Image: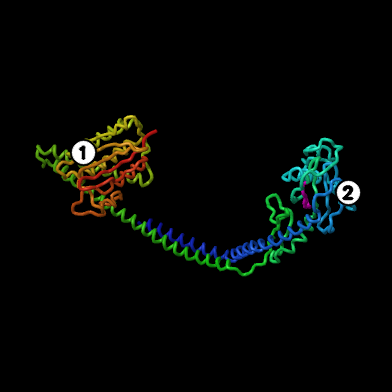
Amino acid sequence: MKSRTSLVIAVFALLTLFGACWQAWEASRLDSRLRAIDEQSQIERLMELSTERICAAASELLAAERAKLGKAPDLARLDYPMPSGGKEDYVKGYFLLTPDSLRVPQGETAFEKALTENATLIDTIRRKAFNPAAPVLNPNEADRVNTATQDGVFAVFEANETDPAAPLAAKGEPSTFFAWNYLDDVVYMRRIPTTHGTAAEGVVMDAAKLAERLLPLAEPGLREAEISHPNRYESANLAPLPLVLRPGKAVDIPNTEARHDAVQRTVRAAWFTTLLTIGILFAILAVYARLERRRSDFVSAVTHELRTPLTSFQMMTEMLANGLVPADKVDEYHDNLHRESKRLAHLVENVLSFARLTRGKVRGRQDAGPCRQLLSGVFEKTAQRLRAAGFKVTVTQDARTELLSLRTDLLSLEQILTNLADNAVKYAGGVNTPAVTVSTMRSHRSLQVRFADNGPGMQEEIRKRLFKPFSRSAHADKNRKPGIGLGLALSRDIARSIGGDLSLEKSTPQGTTFILTLPLGE
């Protein structure tokens, strides 16, 4: 008792300590948690406003570039005129790349030289003209497709005109413009179908200068915001440009409702800890009281049930030893001693089995074979016990079990039926013609064994606590029968330990029926 009390106190102390530490931890993190919540909320709000404004501005810039390029160019002209409206500071240059030549506006010598020397960019433009989903080639990678020459690049594009001497002409309407990243640049281009393949017209823009133009449109609260190409694990959020706006780490934080919510969270945590500690304390005390009551019921019941046979043993053995028993009564005394010893052995076996199951230990043995063969022996032993007590016993087995196999623990099964038989002897033995019917019936994946007697039945109050250990002894009365109220609780536990179950089907003034469910073998 002292050890259990100490355990309860120790558990309560640990829970109290845990609650106090939890509250201290929550309080210490309050400021950082509030700041993190405010920062995240503010960043999300400012990013939503900034991206919407910058995307609108980017759309206007690109619309202006489309207007400068106008409709499809005249492919028959050998020169490429500068688009009307001039060139913005973020524009590196305009180009027209046909299947047979590269054209740039007159006077754009630096841009033409840079573009001509950048074979990888030209190759990528050609591939994008043929297929907008084509990958962007990186000149820093060892596996780039082309070298300093363009030989072999044209071969990947389908040409509609097989005669290279035929004049180049447009064939169909240009496609819509689309943008893609190349190193530090953004290429904005459209595809033009021609008689000799697909041409590309567009503009090469400096991504850094585009960022300088667009970044002032971001919210001032994003003090470290930046615009650049997305990395491998990012997605562009400034459509239609393939660029990404990052908020940075520094952000101006106003007072928000999130701070109040965080404070309330800490308060709720403190109250929850207090209530949890109180609830756990009461639960532990209730469990402790229940265990103590069960222990007291167990000691009381076992003591009483052991005292009766021991008293009989002592009295009858002393009479036999002192020669006080008449010669014609000696056999009767021996029968009584044998009967009391069997009752005592059965009581001890039930107590030991209950203790084993409580500790999670089961026999673990398996008996396998045909249903009829395995059950017949167990049923016969149970029937003999009942017939010796004056019962009429009827055993019937379902014909559908002829070909079924059963895998179970016969010792456990015998103990369950023995407990049911003892109950029948105690409570149904007083009727005029006591009888028990044992029958089997196959269900979906199990075998059901019905054990029915013709006793007086049980009251509703008794049925509610029927399978609780020591429930009889806790509600003893003047008509109390021998036993400690452990048989049915033990029987159900044994049945479940072997994969089955035991339940009460019905209890009426005409009799009581139990159902034992056993799993069928494979």
Main secondary structure of the magenta stretch: strand
Q: How far apart are the alpha carbons under marks 1 and 2?
A: 117 Å
The answer to whether residue 187 is magenta is yes
Q: Residue at x 77, y 38 (%)?
A: 158
In this view, the residue in front, 420 or 319, is 420
Residue 99, placed above or below residue 245: above
Mark 1 closeness class: few <14, some 14–19, many ≥20 residues within 10 Å: many
First in sequence: mark 1 or mark 2? 2
The answer to whether residue 132 is magenta is no
Rendered location of residue 230, percent (x, y): 71, 53
Bounds of the magenta segment? 182-191
Please say whether residue 345 is visible from this viewpoint: no
Rendered location of residue 520, percent (x, y): 36, 35
Q: Are marks 1 and 2 in contact (CB under 8 Å)?
A: no
Q: Amino acid at mark 2?
A: Asp
Residue 446 as seen in the image, left or right of residue 251: left
Q: Amino acid at mark 1?
A: Leu
Residue position marked by numbered label 1 in the rendering: 386
Residue 360 as seen in the image, left or right of residue 416: right
Quarter assignment of residue 92: bottom right
Q: Which mark is residue 79?
A: 2
In this view, the residue in front, 68 or 39, is 68
